[in-house]
Amino acid sequence: MRKIVIDPITRLEGHGKILIYLDEEGRLRDAVLQVPELRGFEAFCRGRRGEEMPQITERICGVCPEAHHLASAKALDAAFHAEVPKAARLQRELFYNAYIFSDHLLHLVFLGGPDLLLPEDVGKAERNVLGVLQRFPELGRQVVAGRAQAQRILELIGGKAIHPVFALPGGVAQPLSEEARATLITAAESLVALGKTMIVVFHEEILPRPEFQALLLAEEAWLPTHYMGLVDEGLAPNFYDGQVRAVSAQGEEIFRLPGAEALSRIGEHWEPWTYVKFPYLVDFGWQGFRAGPDSGIYRVGPLARLNVAERMATPLAQEEYERFLDFFGGKPVHATFAYHWARLIEMVQAAESVLRLAQEPELTGTEVRGKLGQPGEGVGVVEAARGTLFHHYVLNPQGLVERANLIVATTHNAPGIGLSVKHMAAALVEKGRLDEALLNRVEMAFRAYDPCLACATHVWPGRTPVAVEIYDAQGKLLHRLEN
Amino acid sequence: MPETRARIGVFVCHCGKNIAGTVDVAKVAEQAARIPGVVYATHYEYMCSDPGQALLKRAIREHRLTGVVVAACSPTMHEDTFRKAAEEAGLNPYLVEIANIREQVSWVHSGPAATEKAVRVTRTMVAKVQGNRALRPAELGVVRRALVVGGGIAGIQAALDIANAGFDVILVERSPSIGGHMAQLSETFPTLDCSQCILTPKMVEVARHPRIRILAYSEVEEVSGFVGNYRVRIRKKPTFVDPSKCNLCGECARVCPVRVPNEFDRGLSTRTAIYIPFPQAIPSTYTLDVQNCLGILPLRCGKCAEVCEAKAIDFDMHEEILEEEVGAIVLATGYELYPKEAMAEYGYGTVPDVIDGLEFERLLSASGPTRGEIRRPSDGKVPKEVVFIQCSGSRDPEHHKPYCSKICCMYTAKHALLYRHAVPDGQAYVFYIDIRAGGKDYEEFVNRAMQEERILYIRGKVAKVFREGDKVVVWGVDTLTGKRVEVRADLVVLAQAVVPSPGTAELARKLRVACGSEGFLREAHPKLRPLEALTAGVFLAGAAQGPKDIPESVAQASGAAAKVIALLSAPKLAHAPEVAEVNEELCSGCGICAPQCPYGAISVDEVAHVNEILCEGCGTCVAACPSGAMTFRNVEDEQVLRMVRAALEVADVGV
Amino acid sequence: MAAELRLSRENLNAPFVRKVEELSGQNVFACYQCGKCSASCLFAEHMDLLPNQVVRLVQLGDEGVMGARAPWVCAACLACSVRCPRGVDVARIMEALRQLGLRRGLTPVELRLTPDLPQIALVGAMRKVTP
Amino acid sequence: MKLKLAVYWTGSCGGCDVSFLELGPGLLDVLPQLEIVFWPALVDAKRGDLEKLPSRSIDVALVNGVIRTAENKEMVELLREKSKQLGAYGACAHLGGVPALANHAPGFTEVVFGPGFRPASPWPEAPEDAPPALLPEALPLDEVVPVDFVVPGCPPPAGLIARFFQAALSGEVQAGQVFAEDKALCEECPRTREERRLTRIVRPHEVVPDPKTCLLDQGMVCLGPVTRGGCQAACPQAGMPCTGCLGPTPKAGDPALAMLSALASLVRAGEEGEDAFPQENQILDSLVDPIGTLYKYAYAKYARPLQRLARRREEVRA
Amino acid sequence: MSGFEPRVVAFLCRWCAAAGADLAGTNRLQYPPHAIPIRVNCSGRVEPQWVVEALKAGADGVLIGGCHPGDCHYVVGNYKTRRRVYLLRKVLEEMGIEPERVRLEWVSATEGGRFAQVMAEFVAELKRLGPLHEPGGPG
Amino acid sequence: MNRLVYFPGCALKDQAQGYEAATLAAVQALGYAVQELPRWNCCGTVYALAQDDLMRHVGPVRNLIRAQEQGATELLTLCAMCYNTLSRSALFVRNPENLRRINAFMDEEEDYRGGVRVLHLVQWLAEIGPERLARAANPGLQGLRIGAYYGCTLLRPKEVAVDHPEKPEIMEGILAALGAEPVLFPERVECCGAYLAVTRPEAVRLRVGSILLSAAHHGAELVVTACPLCHFNLRERRPLGAPRLPVAYLGEVLAWALGTQPIPEEIARTVGVRR
């Protein structure tokens, strides 16, 4: 047997590694994505105070703590039978859109940016944030400034930008002042401006590039799965709230349900060789690692959201969405690299939403806590930047956590990422070509998901360094490639 | 690090056979000698003897010891002895510690275990001494003047006693005259002396005393400083009458057009806006009550000034703030009666012929509104059936005050008896739960009221009092017969609970003196320090501390005065240096420490400060301090942790 | 002398006392026998024992109080309970005695039914004095 | 001479790495002065490159994350060997952090996966491909290798990161230095403190706090008094109690026990005395989950020794 | 657990418990020698950290002796101690350490007999609980 | 229009129908829509005082659940006894342990979550405020001297009292706002004998006589009550020779004052003679 290990560097920090097994004839036997780390939040959340969950679970992921913070708060709203007052809801939603903006921006420029903005032949020493900043100094300046504005919004409402503290069952910690609103509006305006800039950059610098178009249409990066995401009443994507809609690989609605009920439609499969679990739609059951209309495997995240939605919620985003659909000729779009474009569209919607919410008169309302009932069970769901995020708690009468289950965005995508990797690997093996460019494609394939193997992996910021080692059956190193 | 340079000496005492009979003292010394930092260890038959002390001194000098542990008897026995000896040899006494291997080892254990424990105990104390610092006691001078707050009988007595011992006294009284409630009373139990007759001479004595300065119509505004050195700000309200000119002719009052309820008569009569509270008032002068006067601003009336021949009335008089320094303070702010308006079931104070005990005193008093005739407020009739209700508002944790007001049993008996004297054909009823007559001649007095005056005592509480025509109906019960009773009375007298006088809580706060939950000033210790407040240099007298009758108030006042005299007589105040201390580099001023201190020794601004003189060294604040900024001299955390480790060390203890 | 009431540790700690305390949720020893409950009770004249005496007998552990009429006369008007200076809910003690009686099969009260009695009176009475 | 810097993450959430971005434009000033020899998030140096470096050739290494797996341990040992100075960056490396609460949840793989989960290789032929073994306990960095300095916080606030770079770039990082204030958070907190007493302990969701008054005075368990300043009291300013991410002040010792003592000292149910005991107990009992509340970040560093004793007790009993 | 001799640290308030211990000595009342006394001015000075440090450093149990309620030389120090110990024991229990290993006792200066008895009871209780540490360690 | 969910209870569907009709009309005239609680059951009439008598709480709590189902946070009662039993049970289940135990007794009902406030007509009237009542009072009560008789269940125990148990003034405030001259009389808070009407009618007669005497003595022309049992006793169990004072429900005088109902002939006669 031969084995290819794609291990982000030293296999300890990658928190996600890819193992490819070949038979003696060099045919692909299997390829898996392994998450070699476990922190076990579900276990030690037990016995903790319910209201602490937004602050504890956000430590699952420092890249998207905002998502955990609010998924958790929403689960608590439900567990305490609380109605969130308008002012608190607006605070949360505004905060949340600012987060989506900031996170997507981060990926587009700092993470995916080097792949998208730099020529393919650029040296690996330059293929990073610094490279992008050097080539596009003005864009870099705008992005740094824009992100600072978004962080300012997060800090103003959340208390802290990374690991915010403001959400509580039934509402938020305290009311916002009118002075705060003024700051928010100014910041929001600059987010919208940056969104527009990014659209221009995308259409002028990225999309016209043939190699990018080839990627978008590459067969091995075309994965027909089901999709899941939150939509509002008008079937536009909503990051903070709404119903969970699942759409099949053929584009038909599988279900549209409130979070708690949707959760019951998701099963979890585990394998002993990884610390991440594999969710699937129970309507189809776990059919193993394969895509297609009969499989239970589905994907979440920007592309999935655009596939489950029928329109965007804001005008600029809608314009770009239409261009996107034109390009692919309709839905569902299965191109894994379309995640990048989808991310751009969402980022614009988020910016526009922040501005709209900042102008809502009730944002500064002083009633920020709903009445709490007896604690019980609750499910909270939001769309994290990387996809649907479920928090599910059972609280005891004292309001302590009895049970917690979390399905994080990248977990939903774990089977999909595994498959993308497998397809890429198959292509790699078939072509028998083990050069650096091809290797980078493997990497780009899973980077498109912006995988924050949240509870486990960390691939931010920038590229995930990959080494490929090919051994023979005796374990002798045959070939080693690094990007 | 002190311990690296430490040169500790260990002295193990045999105490004859007391220790050596059980503990292998040689072994203890031998083990001690092995402890790093111990440069000298020995054992001796009687360390406390002269030769023993000489041995200690010699060793300190010869071995240049920086710390000493004497393993001997309880520190309560000879800690002082050895510390003094060390001091004579030039070693700071606070570098000497005792390891108690007698009371807590040799006398209570036996066999090798005793020696092992002795070794551990000694080792533990060596660990402590290694962390000790040289300390010096703090010293401070004393301002030889006292402040007495409250001019009732307790305050008067305390002021006189202190002044007679040769110290200056400032006596502050809130109302225009001293005398307090005692001046309002008719006769006093159990002797039936005329209250004013025994009080007036004392008031005059105060007025004439060269060492007493009376500040009437004044209140304590602010107190700062600490024992021996208090600074007091006193607000003196203007009386608009110059006492040195006023000759008490009374013309001013005669022309004054204003009539307001007379406080001294508890509203049963009226007074003018310029008035003298009662004829014997001290200071002996009229006071113009600016709240009710028509004429001060704008000048509309001014009739009194016109008729005053002595030109004593001065409308330009202003409030004064006096600043005084005193060494000690006596609080004698007295009591008030619980308002009858709080007694829902007894008519909420709305029935005019339901009155309280002090009102009845005024009715009984020869100088009162009725000249001593008993006439009820509503219509001036002489009441023929009078009901006295004891425990009105007292002993009622559910609705009113949980405690016994202590004086009501006696004054009710007195009231009933005096009523019978005044209205021989009247009937008095007393509703009671228990009779508490524990005082000299008290029981006899109550018996006299029952037996000779045929006052009917009914054991049972009254449920409800209400007005029915010109009668006051009382629903009660006689629990002894098991029958409900109804009395249609002419007058009802409520023995209202005794409560602290208004303003007591505020004054207590200014002085950082604790109040109990019922608002009475709290003594430092209920049994052993009943005369002192927890704040050093503040003493308590009279009913401000709890319900008290006259003899008890006077006794406590004299006791407090004696404490003050002792304090003011000391040449210097010395204070043990083993107290709490703030590391200002670490203190964030969170203020958690301050309320821990029962002595008010901690103040907090940017950081906390410990007043070394006030701190008694309990260390509660240190344990409460979350950041570790508060420390305790010679009981630092690091020291204790080293002691703990020394106590538990597994290493062979050699037995 | 043959005493009417023999006091002993056993009596004072009798299950009866504990049962009354449990059922009523009251500590009968909080009562200091001031009689305010009795003074408040407008039905005391129809009772054989005053309310405070009922409490006293419970304090003494005298199970004979079970034979008393007083608890059955009590109208549960709660005047005693709101006025008690010690916060003892005397009405609950009365209820406890009624309950104990009813559970032992005592029904010492005769219902005097007349046609004009409204439902509210009937249900109220039956809930208090019938099992 | 540029500063040779290494940054490495172990069991962490990634927030620490993101936190460098909070420097904003300041980051662009700092970056040119650095020679990043190893920083998986930023540059492509690999373990192999690191192994090839001479001993003590890295000027400063920063580690964030809790030490959770055997791999984590190997890796920080390697870094220690290659670095002149090694610092714990963030609460996880400093104190164990939130993920170290797992020490208080024995058998947690069962909770996550259900019974019967044992890590294994996807192909029996390659047993080495099993996920790395978990250490029996999640550990703070200084339990594994000597630590020279600490940049605390969850994640470290921008001001403290800036302060660290200032010191590092001028070569002035002191041994044992903690890049935060020695004084507690209360120093920076704008809330006002009245007479301190706790007549009740409330949880943040139970009350809407008064915007001006100290949260502790309002009954919330705010760890401000025991926690280092340096964040400008961000959480209390946002109406939420401090949960202690910057770690204890220099002399506080075990911050949970220090705060426990302070809280218990402040509890009052009316007059001090025996009568108040039941009510006091009730107030104290309303401090639910004291472990999670007081040891949120510091469990691994302070509570673990006792926990270990307890676990051994359980084994003995079993 | 035969042969197990528990190690104990006793923090004794100087005015009550330590004086009570002295009285036990004066009256020659024998009690088990396992506890090493550490005298403090007030039980209110005892910090929960000391107790935990003692347990970590090898103690099988810790005793805190203070004045009876109402008798504290410093008026209220013992009440603070009581509350601290109450909470501390809760925390210990949550960690799986028997809270009985930390005992708070009120012993007055006149209660020599009571002091001896408390010591005997506590040592017996600790013997029943068994050692907190493995033989030999830590120390 | 503001909605009120209202619990009638047995008496209002029986001997106190007049009270219900008058009150509902008047409340509507004040601008509130009244909705009768669907599927209500008996309140229990008298509150169970025994600690172990959990079953007696099930009925009242079930009514609270019905209110909860309606999304109501307040439940209005007219009968003082219903008010007493319901609000005391509501208080009882404020203790989470009690709540858990009572919820365990329910079968098809959803769990009670707490949070329904039981309030009595007098509280409601006091809360909408005297100004509003005074504005709506046409023709008003024209100085009628009314003694408000509270009885027990509105005032005791103090945890559910609508006002101070010894010196209530809430009804007087309402009556004054409606244009009456309230008369305070000592026995207005003392028990009428309640259900002793069934077991000891003679005790009730003595009490009723005493109460009416007390009211008359202090100058009342009319006694007003909010309790159907008091109303029954005061009217139907008078001893011979008792003052001939008319007795009416609070809701009735409210209706007279607002003009939604005329003063009944007999009462008009009695009080009108002297006017």
Image: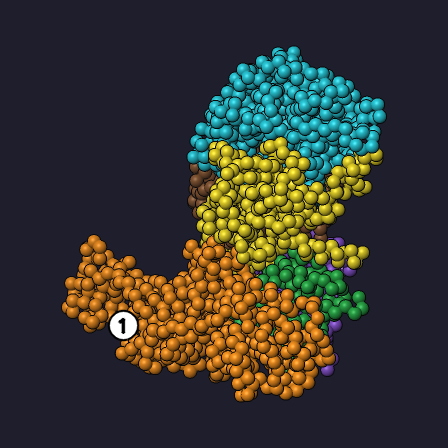
Shown colour of chain A: cyan
**Which chain's colour is brown?**
F
| The C terminus of chain A lies in quadrant | top right
In the figure, A258 relative to B313: above or below?
Answer: above
The chain holding disc 1 is B
The quadrant where residue B316 appears: bottom left
Asked whether the viewer can see residue D283, the reply is: no
| B64 vs B570, nearest the viewer | B64
Question: Looking at the image, which residue is at 19% across and 55% down?
Answer: B300
Disc 1 residue type (three-letter): Pro
Q: Colour in which chain C is shown?
A: purple
Q: Nearer the viewer, residue A46 or F170?
A: A46
Who's the residue at 47% across and 48% down the image?
D189
Residue A227: x and y in percent read: 69, 23
Chain coloured green: E
Task: Give the quarter of the image for residue A107.
Answer: top right
The residue that disc 1 covers is B283
Q: Is residue B22 in view? A: yes
Colour of chain D, in one word, is: yellow
What is the number of callouts on the image?
1
Instruction: Look at 28% across and 58% down and name the residue there.
Output: B291
What's the colour of chain B in the image?
A: orange
